[in-house]
Amino acid sequence: MKVPYEQIAVYLSGKASPWEKEEVEKWLAESVEHRTVFRSLEKEWRFLKEEATPSLPDKEQIWTKIREIIDLPVVAVSYSKQVLIKYVSLTACVALLFGAALSFLLGNREGGSTQFTAYAPLGEKALLTLPDSSRVWLNSGSTLTYSTQSRQRMVHLQGEAFFEVTKDPRRVFIVQSGDVNVQVHGTSFNVSAYDVDPDIAVSLESGLVSLLNNKNGAVLAQLHPNQMGRVSKLDLKCSIVDDDTGITKLWTHNILKIYDNNIYEVAKKLERWYGVEITLENANPDRHYTFVVKTESLKELLTLLNKMTPIAYKIEGKEVNIRLQ
């Protein structure tokens, strides 16, 4: 969902021109979901106005005030397929903080602890810098949660992320996903743990990581560079295979590699990549595909796919129907 944050900020400040008001009201009339988001933004705007009394939506004032209020543990930059990395703007800040994160943060400051949740919407990605200077690339449709008060450096991941962890001999760094903990000290690695996937896949670029059962601490596997560990969510059985992390993390460079995937796996990855919903007809799960997506639009990609397998497709907004011939 595209949210016109800057227009809404001006609208809430009471300084919107007639045409700006019309644009926001038109957006509100489009769906109940839009109105729900607006009410949430309006609530947070009033809170900030009471605290800081901003007369204009000044990005530096708002950003500084938010940091003072919630002791923000993460700096985030969102980027799309068109722009790999764009520096923090009012839209990026407000989108990340007001998009269901700020209310949660402000409601969980008891005991001096604050939780921050970063979400990369479908079709977009985010680059995060944690308080210990570790960097995290967050893939489309992924969520990362981090607590400001923890003796351990622990993050919770749903989806996919690539980590560059800063070394700290005194504190171990843990990525928790489902029943699996990835434990490291100073390492770069990729974790793929989308809810719909049957396995949690960890691909190690440098350093050493241990995969642990987070219920009893049992070691499931230890990985060395250029190895991937796949842990079954069903029974926590782990298999280790050779892996080229440079290829695995291509998505951080805005390149999607499809390798030996059936059509259902291809559709799932394209949904995340382009932020769409795909419906398949006459799909053959025995047919596998290998290709790379760089700067191609969805329409261009489907045209190329048609050359590999005859298909008919229809795109209506965010809904895509693909019929295999």
Image (cartoon, rainbow, N blue to C red):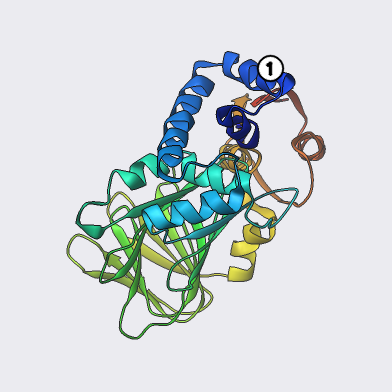
Q: Is 187 drawn above or below residue 62 in the view shown? A: below
Q: State the image coordinates of residue 38 (x, y, percent, origin top left).
A: 50, 26
Q: State the image coordinates of residue 317 (x, y, percent, origin top left).
A: 69, 23
**Which quarter of the image is occupied by the N terminus?**
top right
* Residue occupying image coordinates x 21% and y 52%: 110
Q: Quadrant of residue 176?
A: bottom left
* Residue occupying image coordinates x 59% and y 43%: 269
Q: State the image coordinates of residue 161 (x, y, percent, origin top left).
A: 50, 58
Tell whether 163 sits left or right of 311: left
Q: Identify which residue, 280 or 106, lies in the foreground.
A: 106
> Which secondary structure lies at badge 1?
helix
Residue that sits furthest to the bottom in the current view: 169
Q: In this orientation, does residue 193 appear?
A: no
Q: In this orientation, does residue 199 appear?
A: yes
Q: State the image coordinates of residue 220 (x, y, percent, origin top left).
A: 29, 68
Q: Amino acid at mark 1?
A: Glu
Q: Quadrant of residue 311?
A: top right
* Residue occupying image coordinates x 33% and y 65%: 154
Q: Identify which residue, 69 or 197, lies in the foreground.
A: 69
Residue that sits furthest to the left in the current view: 216
Residue that sits furthest to the top in the current view: 29
**Which quarter of the image is occupied by the C terminus?**
top right
Dot 1 crowding, Cα within 10 Å, few <14, some 14–19, many 20+: few
Tell whether 281 sits left or right of 35: right
Q: Which residue is mark 1?
A: 22
Q: Identify which residue, 76 or 237, lies in the foreground.
A: 76
* Residue occupying image coordinates x 32% and y 64%: 181
Give the number of callouts: 1
Q: Is 209 drawn above or below residue 8 in the view shown? A: below
